[in-house]
Image (tube, coloured by chain):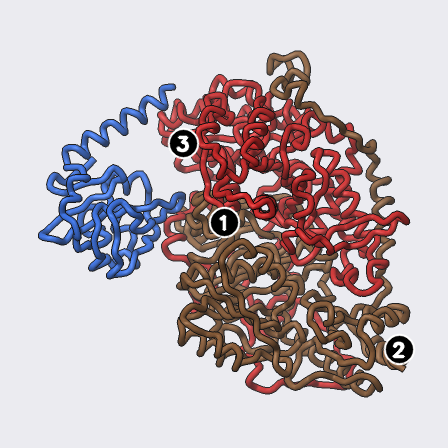
Chain colours: A blue, B brown, C red
Amino acid sequence: MEIIEHYLYTKEHEWINIEENVGTVGITEYAQSSLGDITFADLPSVDKEVEQFEQLLSVESVKAASDIYAPISGRIIEVNDELTEDPGLINKHSYDKGWIVKIEISDMDETSNLLTGDEYRSYLETLERDDHQETEE
Amino acid sequence: MLATIGVKSVDDLFVDIKPQHAPKSFDLPVGLSEYEVMRKLTRLALKNSNELIPFIGGGYYDHYVPVACQALISRGEFYTAYTPYQPECAQGTLQALFEFQSSICALTDMDVANASVYEGGTALYEAMMMAIRITGRKKIVMDSGVSPIYRKLIKSYTHNLSFEFVETDVLHGQTDRVAIAKLLDKKTAAVILQNPNFFGTIDDHADIVEKAHAVGALVIESVYPIALGLLKTPGAMGVDIVTGEGQSLGLSLSFGGPYLGFMATRKKFIRQMPGRIVGETVDAQGRRCFVNTLQAREQHIRREKATSNICTNVALCATQAAIFMSLLGKSGLKTMAQLNLDKAEFARQEFSKIKGVEVKRSSPTFNEFTLALSKDANDVIEAMIKHGFAAGFPLGRYYKGMEKYLLVAVTEKRTKEEIMAYAKALAEVLK
Amino acid sequence: MKLIFEKSKPGRLGFQQPVSDVPVKATLPQKYVRQKEAALPEMSELDVVRHFTQLSQRNFSVDANFYPLGSCTMKYNPKFTEKVAALAGFAELHPLLPQLRSGEKYVQGALEVLYETEQWLCEITGMKAFTMQPLAGAHGELTGVMLIAAYHKAKGNKKKFIIIPDSSHGTNPASAAVAGYDIVSVPSNKEGGMDIVKLKAVLTDECAGLMITSPDTHGVFNSHITEIAELVHAVDGIMYYDGANLNATMGRCRPGDVGFDVVHLNLHKTFATPHGGGGPGAGPVGVGAKLENFLPISRVSKCVDGFFALKYDYQDSIGYIASFYGAFGVILKAYAYMLLLGKDGLKATSDHAVLNANYLMSRLKGVYRVAFDRICMHDCVFSADRQAERGVHAIDIAKFLIDRKIHPPTVYFPLTVKEAIMIEPTETESKETMDVFVEAMLEADALSQKDPEQFHSFPKTMPISRPDETKAAREMKVNFFAQNE
């Protein structure tokens, strides 16, 4: 599963790429593949203030609806309008063209609540292990 | 079979039901043969009166249903199927529902329709909830020309929720524009209207739509589908959500159900619309086909976060309406609407000649109109029953101060003779 | 197949309206008139008949196919009930008639049907009274939760949430949420029943009630049900019985006797009314003494002289939840069905439903992993996880069955079981029919070992195969005219 080293992650499978005080947010390769083909992203409005780990938006696939949480607190300064026409970008390019929102970060210290690329990779491994055990039962 | 399972008796299969769970009573009659049940129920059916000539409407009408409609819907392939979970073996139901949605859109001039909800009343409730979700507001302005049956239902549903309801009076039979304009503000989620309204009056709500949109409120209109054969469409008025009772589209009156609620809206609101929606797609080989779509809004996926708790709908009734609309067709529906209009107009003219009758009409009506009588409407109805007529609905039941008002419906099924006989009886009753 | 709109030819007519016999041709002011005729199809009657007949032939149905859709109870719908509902004395009855003064006299037969059906349902479930108004199972659930809310409001109870097991239908949490409650989900234990320890952990004074399906969607009757009811009642919570699966226990257990306060039934399941391709159904709600005062109005009462009347005078009633008295045509069919079966027939129905489900479970369990290895009730749940490891998922097995002209079981529900295949044969199927199904299931498994790739091309014999649902959801073509403008 692809993971970009310099991004930060959440256990809910969001990623954030921080440049200066702006974080670009999307969902991980793992998240997009477990959701399946995304058919709709219910994009939030620009200027909305969000809190860390609060619900940011929901995305829909044919068989599921899933909430996506804000990895960090701040103000939404941009949403990826291209997703309105082509929500499949999240599937095809989850780490770049499939970005969802840009947040102007209000508290940089909150990054300590996020996982590094390495930590996220180990977290995924624990998930896969649990998953395997369940089917063994 | 017991041996395959590995038990000795059927009772062994019920081991989880312990003695303390046993029924305290199960005292029911013994079963009957099919013939005996038929006989019993035929007798019960005869206890209901069919002799009364119906001049009663109130949103539910005695229209003729072409026999082909009933014949087609009686095919076991339609009525013994279930929700199209597996599209490959349910294309019949799915395509019929897609055609239903399309016909409803054509009738109302709206972009999208769902595959039906339970009935006209719950459709209006769902539309109101939709408007509340879309606008994030909680104030509802409701014209009291909207069916009192629907208004009572909506109030029961929302009794425990913190919505603000304001009702406006009817002015000269139509929506009171001034009253509504005063109530419209940035807190208003929706204005709820009906056309024709409960008094049978028709209206053009375009001006109200404009004012509502100016403050960011939506307009919901409940319609009578047969009237739309002639009347200006909600789509042309700019209405945001259209609902209606589809009983008149080929369903029998059947003492209140099963009926058919329909809902149509603008494309941008489709995700907030509850109920099943059928969409077109292609299969693995590129062949056009139909599936239940946008299911991620629904309860079986979203559970408590769903747009509504609605599960299935009334697919068979929707199919029935689709067949009815196909049989009548473009010109047939218009002809039927014109017939209703003509007969009602004739009846109105005849009844207005009767001493003790004043026809309340400052605005045009469709196939239902209000008579102001010189006597209590209940008394008149009771006396008219003796003459063999279900003479109409007493408006005093729902509207204070209207005890002498009678709501009379005249569909295409009423003959000139029946109308004249009604007039004669009414003259006698009011003497 | 072409859409009916694509077959339309200008000027054709499928139904001839009568010529007007009144000497009036009315016109409306232009501003009230539609500018363009509605673009409904223009077809001859034969063309309409053929179109819809051909459409019907693209459906599987109980009349033509084995339809073991788990939790939906696709039993045979006796033909004669259709004729009953079509009797003019019922079909042509206007719902406002009894609301006219002395009008009740003219609907005595219909009111008797409503009254008698209520009596039957009370005796079958052990409840005190029923409202026949709810128009579907989910509508019944909403009504039931509204009754719960009214009860707590009247007592001044501050309640916040409803407890629902994770195996429930999605309508349970959705209905409770619509009525204004939060949802607390409780996981099932390994036997498939509700985990009592976990229930105790979440059961506080703020619990308004517990909604539970019995037997549940795992096909399990919870032997601890009376204990659960005591726990819930101890915090003045209401026990809600989702009657989706009553078909398994008629004559063997009544919800009213084991602590339930409110129930909804699905007449289209247990009482054999047709499913109609997805409705109309009917979801009457029954209550014990605690909740009776809150029932919706109107209610049918029987006077001493045997006259049936509609009563509205119940001060604590939650009001109106349907425009009239329920899906009368559906209720009528259920009543006819109950009269036909009677006491012994109803019990036999449940016995045979459970026997059939256990037979199927026994025949399949070596090959498919059974989710809960124990005697089941009306349905049995398997997991296709073994097959999935070979690349053949529950959905692929479903598509395989379609080619055998068998309607697939429910797949991917309940959500608690991976690769779930939920099978409910119902009592109306013969051993021979079930054996054909078993053979097909065994062949599917054998093929999954030999040639799993083949599954992706199933079904092969239908007019369409594997529709692209993603495309449908992304493009949202739901109206023929919008895409053809």
Left or right: B298 as drawn, with respect to C346: left
Which percent across, then down, holds residue A7?
A: 14, 43
Q: Amino acid at mark 2?
A: Val
Both marks 2 and 3 on one chain: no
Q: Quadrant of the N terminus of chain B?
A: top right
Give me the residue at 46% from left, 33% from top: C166
Q: CA distance from mark 2 to mark 3?
A: 73 Å
Q: Residue furthest left?
A: A20
Numbered badge on residue B429: 2
Q: Quadrant of the C terminus of chain B?
A: bottom right
Give me the residue at 40% from left, 53% from top: C472
Q: Which residue is mark 3?
A: C393
Q: Amino acid at mark 1?
A: Gly
Which percent across, then down, holds residue B69?
A: 68, 59
Q: Residue furthest front?
A: C156
Is C232 located above or below residue C99 in the figure?
above
Is B19 located above or below residue A131 in the figure?
above
Q: Chain of mark 1?
A: C
Both marks 1 and 2 on one chain: no
Mark 2 and 3 residues: CB-CB less than 8 Å, in contact?
no
Numbered badge on residue C180: 1
Give me the residue at 75% from left, 47% from top: C332
Q: CA distance from mark 1 to mark 2?
A: 51 Å
Q: Is residue C214 visible?
A: yes
Left or right: C412 as drawn, with respect to B429: left
Q: Amino acid at mark 3?
A: His
